[in-house]
Image (cartoon, rainbow, N blue to C red):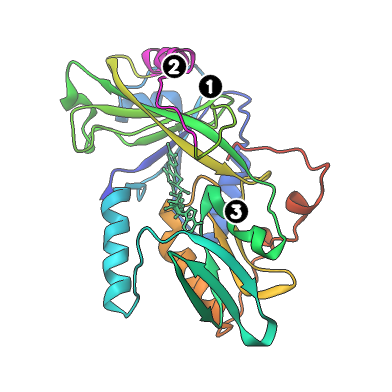
Amino acid sequence: MTVVGGLDLFPPDPAIPMDDYVTSLDEVGIPFELLTVDAIADRWPQFRLPPGTVGLFQDRGAIVPAGRGTRVMQQLATRHGAVLRDRSPVSGLRDLGAAGVEVEAGGATYRCRGVVLCADAWTNDVLAGLGQTVPLTVTLEQATYFAPEDPSRFEPRRLPLWIWMDEPSFYGFPCYGEPTIKAAQDCGGPEADPDHRTDEVDRARLALLADHLATTLPGSGRPVRSLRCHYTLTPDRDFVLDRVPGHESVVVGLGAAHGFKFAPTFGRLLADLATGDRAHELPAFRLDRPALTDPAYAPHWLV
Ligand SMILES: Cc1cc2nc3c(=O)[nH]c(=O)nc-3n(C[C@H](O)[C@H](O)[C@H](O)COP(=O)(O)OP(=O)(O)OC[C@H]3O[C@@H](n4cnc5c(N)ncnc54)[C@H](O)[C@@H]3O)c2cc1C
């Protein structure tokens, strides 16, 4: 984990209300500072922001490399007795009631007491075995790397992570692992099929992002490469951490396109739900909440 600090930038009349952040951070006792444009410019002169922008800075904001982080979690799980079966897609899931759950995967059939299902964009494929679905939208997103002429100005010790808290919402990283700035729009892409994903660069979205960066972070350079990936979104952008109603032996975990950082906590909560060892009150993440059950619920994805 590389601690660089996290700066949420709220322009005047932002689409994402700052109060939600201030109240939540106060409630859980996480320290933060509110900074004016001048105070931001004193600390990070790289930014050029519209007058009236307020920065909410958390000094513990950090970067965790997802690939390496996932490998570490896999190694720890193996050390504690987990068996990892790669390339074994689940092709059948049956609830046998008191006899447990039957899972077909990679040509083998397993009988188990409980199942934790974390298949993100493919959650509904697996849940079909129980006749269940979750209203999920999969979008095709795009992240882009920009090459500044002077990368030393954008090093982690000189620049925090930042998020532009408006519609569209953009976010970016200081130079990390290579002399480029990674930036993207949050929830900017069209709906997509995760099994048929294009790698073609969306030029219009790239221009929007490049424009924003050139304005708010001058010197961040020209775009050198873009990559596509998908988001799996619930209508309220909140997570799913719950037993499937009517099929209590099956637990679903879903990160709603901002879940990587919570993986260790999700693991603990999902294990507790599956074993029933400890009860947790997680109403916001239940499968029977209105956002997932009311067809009239209007999706909103900004966080
Ligand atoms: C551009 C981008 C930026 C992001 N930034 C952040 C961030 O800054 N912070 C953050 O916390 N999160 C971020 N996220 C979101 C985060 O990456 C996801 O929430 C997280 O990776 C989801 O992990 P997962 O294990 O639930 O799903 P996945 O990693 O998608 O894993 C699901 C797995 O299920 C497998 N699968 C599919 N079908 C089956 C089947 N039938 N049987 C068995 N397995 C199956 C798939 O092969 C896949 O390996 C970002 C996502 C994107 C795209």
Quadrant for residue 70, please give it: bottom left
Q: Which residue is mark 3?
A: 125
- Quadrant the C terminus occupies: top right
Question: Of callouts 2 and 3, which one flags the residue occurring earlier in the amino acid sequence?
Answer: 3
Q: Residue at x 40, y 20 (%)?
A: 201
Q: Please rate how many residues cluster around mark 2, counting C-alpha atoms within 10 Å: few if below 14, some from 14 to 19, many from 20.
A: some
Query: Is residue 296 found left or right of 179 in the rendered image?
Result: right
180 sits left or right of 188 in the view: left
Separation of residues labelled 2 and 3 (CA atoms): 38 Å
| Above or below: residue 14 compared with residue 299 | above
Point out the stretch of residues depicted in magenta: 196-216
Give the percent coordinates (x, y) of residue 139.
55, 34
Q: Determine crowd level at label 3: few under 14, some 14-19, many 20+ residues with C-alpha closer than 10 A.
A: some
Inspect the image, locate mark 1, and give the three-letter code of the amino acid beneath it: Gly
The label nearer to you, 2 versus 1, is 2
In this rendering, the count of numbered labels is 3
Is the C-beta of the residue carrying label 1 under 8 Å from the nearest atom of ligand 1? Answer: no
The verdict on label 3 being within 8 Å of ligand 1 is: yes
**Between tags 2 and 3, which lies in front?**
3
Q: Which residue, given by chain and number where applicable, does mark 1 sit on?
A: 52
Label 3 – label 1 distance at C-alpha: 47 Å
Q: Position of residue 130 (x, y in %)?
A: 68, 65
Label 1 crowd (10 A; few <14 / some 14-19 / many >=20):
few
* Residue of label 2: 212
Q: Secondary structure at mark 1?
A: loop
**Figure quadrant of residue 244:** bottom right
Residue 26 within the segment the image draws in magenta: no
